[in-house]
Amino acid sequence: MAGEKPNGSKEMGGDDSELSSIEGLDSKKIKNKSGLKKIIFIVVPILILLGGGFAVYHFILSKPAGKVAPTAINVRKNITPGNMIELKPFLTNLANKNSSSYVKASITVELKPGGNAGLFKQLTPQIRNSIIMILSSKTSHEINTPAGITALRHQIARSLNRILGRGQVVSVYFNNYLVQ
């Protein structure tokens, strides 16, 4: 038979049905590959998001309840708080040169445990004067940032310790604070 090879197969170019069936297989493979790509593009991002969510939950959000690292807040809980004395609000001008600015602040002073609240009340005029002098010497730029406010708290505490005696004032707290 002409066109046949000894093993019984036909030469190329003779049968169109075989060629179309081969092309059909190729198009099915292409369709299967594109479907596989779609699945990969959907499943992989979902797996990444799930893994990231698990990592955030496991490493950041869940902390062991029994093992809490000692922080300033935890250590502070074990200390007996001293007398808290709330002063009347302060309203004073600031030392701005180009504009008229003022600060309004409500301050609470914490004395050491067993601190002399009677002496504090007796020296309230000197204490208020000292705080007003400190506040009025500041510019709005100096005391308008968290770092500036913290420095102001420490400066007031040092000044009050000079008036009341060293170590009497543990901390100074701002209940209300407005710079305008």
Image (cartoon, grey):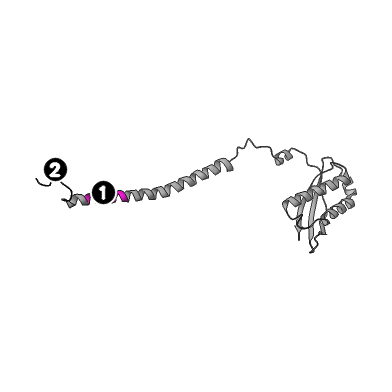
Q: Which residues are magenta?
A: 20-30
Q: Which amino acid does the dot numbered 2 rest on? A: Lys
Residue 146 position within the rendered picture, expressed as x and y whole percent measured from the top left? 72, 51
Residue 106 position within the rendered picture, expressed as x and y whole percent measured from the top left? 79, 54
Mark 1 element type:
helix
Magenta: main secondary structure: helix
Q: Residue furthest top?
A: 66
Q: Read off the residue under disc 1.
A: 25
Q: Read off the residue under disc 2.
A: 5
Res 97 quadrant in image: bottom right
Please check the rendered image and state whether residue 59 is part of the magenta-colored stretch, yes or no. no
**Which one is in front, 103 or 31?**
31
Q: Nearer the viewer, mark 1 or mark 2?
A: 2
Classify 57 as above or below 176. above
Q: Quadrant of the C terminus?
A: bottom right
Callout 1 environment at 10 Å: few (<14), some (14 to 19), or many (20+)? few
- Residue at image x 42%, y 47%? 43
Which mark is drawn over residue 114?
none
- Residue at image x 80%, y 52%? 107
Residue 64 position within the rendered picture, expressed as x and y whole percent measured from the top left? 60, 37
Q: Earlier in the sequence, mark 1 or mark 2?
A: 2
Residue 125 position within the rendered picture, expressed as x and y whole percent measured from the top left? 89, 52
